[in-house]
Each structure stands twice: as structure tokens, then as C-alpha cells.
Image (cartoon, rainbow, N blue to C red):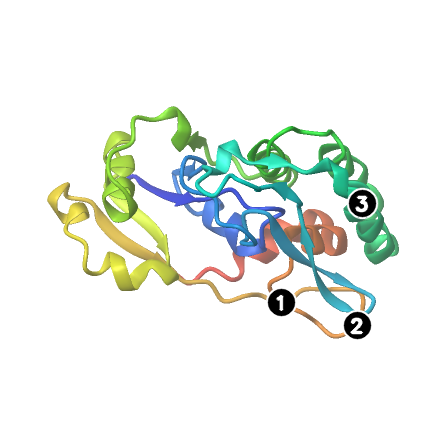
Amino acid sequence: MRNLAIMQPTYMPWIGYFALMDSVDNFVILDSVQFSRRSWQQRNKIKTHSGPIWLTIPVINKGKRDQLIREVKIDYSRKFPKNHIDILIQSYQKSPFFSEYADDIIKVIEHNKPSLSSLTIDLILHIRGLLNINTPITYSSEMSLRGVKDEMLAYICNELEANEYISPIGAKKYLDNSNFFSELNIAIKYFEYNHPYYNQTNGQFEPYMSIVDLLFNNGKESLSILRKGLKS
């Protein structure tokens, strides 16, 4: 059975994003749907000395209410990326594996990519490589899409010849009422993930941080740690 997952590009995603990517035969980056302001698409959490904080990429949205994710431009007038890089250094420079991974991650952030998705996708691909995840990546913007929501997801699966769709559990409510997958003989399976504990600096353990928190603290053990959250 060939399966796939479909996820929007997000900023330095949490570890479950990469656990899902690692668990499927094909991972589709959904970069051709509407941008949602102040969502995971442009922000994520890291752990600082004073606790978790949001890092949010500033974007240009005045007069652009209905932008697609791939159309959103970064607002470089607001001291991005310097602010994010400074916070990452202050928060993680004493972490065991910061020096091993930080330079290349920082280079991606400071590359002055014009669009939000070009930056977030480059970071996702770079971190995928650091984790040694080999799952092929497909982009929805390079496909002929049909419909919206569940219909679109079903036809992405169909076009890529997948007969099983692995969905985040949050979509269960509306997918359970969908007929599009059954009409195409595509099974739906929900991705259930128990967040694993791992070694973490800056005080008491905080789950659901960006993947960089795991990498900076655990290095090459990161992939085996994130796999521990998978339910068999």
C-alpha cells in the first residue's frame, strides 16, 4: 500500500511534522492554498532562558487579503532575520549541538528569500537533510489541483497514485464525513503522535517546540527520538 501525507509549509516546524514526513512514502507540501495570517505558516515556538516564545516572520499583507501561501512576501523592513538569529543564538548557544547545526540554519534564514514559502520550504528541506529523512517531496503548486479541502486532498492522492492518505488527527471531524476518498478507493488513516521527552536546556521540559530545539540539544540522535512518538 502506497501512502502519503499533505501538509502546508510552516516555519521551522515542530518535531511531529518531521515524524509524519518520515513515516510516509511521499510528502506533499501544500503551498497553493490560502495564506492564514499569524498561523504556523509564518511562526513557531522556541525555548528561551525565560520560557517558550513565538518567532514570527513579518509579512506584507496590506491590501492582500486573499494571497496564496506561495504569493506572500516577507517584510524585511522589520529587522528580520536579525532578530530571529539573535534570539536563536542567545537561547541555544550553550546547547550541546548548537555549533554543529546553527551556522547552516542561520545561513538559510539570512538568505533574504523574497517569499515566505521559499524561506520556510528551504528550512524544511535543510532540516530534512540534517535528520537523514529520505521521503520524496512533492509540491502542490506543481500539480493540477481540483476542488478545495477534502476533494482537493483526495485528488492529490489520486494523482500521485496513493491508496492511503495519512492525515493529522485534527482533520478527522471533516474527513470522516467526506465521500471523495471512498469514491477514489483511497483509505484514510490518522497520524497519532505521542510527543517524546528529550534532553533539553533552559529549565523544565517544554514539548511542542520547533524542531531546532531537538536538533540543538540532541544532534544525531534527533531522528531516533522523534520516531519514539509514533504509535504502532
Q: Seen from this angle, which residue lies furthest left?
A: 183
Q: If the image is split into quadrants, where does the C terminus sit?
A: bottom left
Q: Earlier in the sequence, mark 2 or mark 3?
A: 3
Q: Amino acid at mark 1?
A: Pro
Disc 1 and disc 2 in contact, CB within 8 angstroms: no
Between residue 60 and residue 25, name the one nearer to us: 60
Q: Tag 3, which secondary structure?
A: helix
Residue 123, can we see it? Answer: yes
Residue at 38 percent of width and 44 percent of height = 5
CA separation, marks 2 and 3? 21 Å
Residue at 79 percent of width and 72 percent of height = 203
Residue 79: image x %, image y %?
A: 79, 42
Label 2: which residue?
A: 203
Q: Give residue 207's mark.
A: 1
CA separation, marks 3 and 1? 22 Å
Residue at 46 percent of width and 63 percent of height = 193
Instruction: Tell me if 101 is positioned left or right of 185 in this view.
Output: right
Q: If the image is split into quadrants, where does the N terminus sit?
A: top left
Q: Residues within 10 Å of mark 3 (few under 14, many from 20)?
A: some
Q: Give residue 88's mark.
A: none
Q: Amino acid at mark 2?
A: Gly
Disc 3 and disc 1 in contact, CB within 8 angstroms: no
Q: Tag 2, which secondary structure?
A: loop
Q: Amino acid at mark 3?
A: Ile
Residue 151: image x %, image y %?
A: 23, 43
Instruction: Tell me if 187 is positioned left or right of 203 in this view.
Output: left
Q: Earlier in the sequence, mark 3 or mark 1?
A: 3
Label 3: which residue?
A: 85
